[in-house]
Amino acid sequence: MNTKTIFIGISILLLLFTGCAGKQGQSTDTGTADQQPGASQQPAADAQVDKEEVVAEVTSGIDDIDSLDTDLDDSELDSLDGELAEIDW
């Protein structure tokens, strides 16, 4: 009985500790008085550049897939099957 109580107590303490540990890393202070006006705009510009790079990579990936799809076109094989079926073996 005593070990069960200790185990439950330790489990509750661990849950409280891990739950509160995530909240300590978050800042509730916005810090608008200490920041310069242009400082908040720079990360947004970097994020926009990153988004544009990702879009460019996805677009090039789609173009690569389209070219592979064209290269692997199997419509000629359908006509070849028909021609082979007509041959007397």
Image (cartoon, helix red, strand yellow):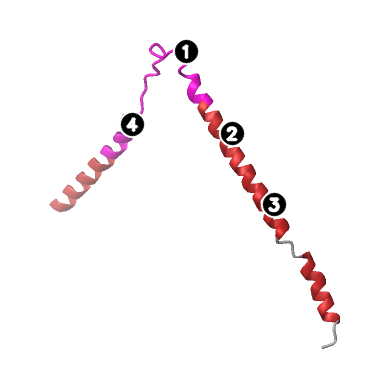
Alpha-carbon span between mark 2 and mark 4: 33 Å
Q: Label 1 amino acid?
A: Pro
Please report the bounds of the magenta region as a residue range.
Answer: 16-45
Mark 3 lies on residue: 66
Mark 2 lies on residue: 52
Question: 50 left or right of 25?
Answer: right
Mark 1 lies on residue: 37
> How many neighbours does mark 2 have within 10 angstroms: few (below 14), some (14-19), or many (20 or more)?
few
Question: 25 left or right of 81?
Answer: left
Q: Nearer the viewer, mark 2 or mark 4?
A: 2
The residue positioned 75% from the left and 65% from the top of the image is: 74
Mark 4 lies on residue: 23
Q: Nearer the viewer, mark 1 or mark 3?
A: 3
Alpha-carbon span between mark 1 and mark 3: 45 Å
Q: Nearer the viewer, mark 3 or mark 4?
A: 3
Q: Which mark is residue 57?
A: none
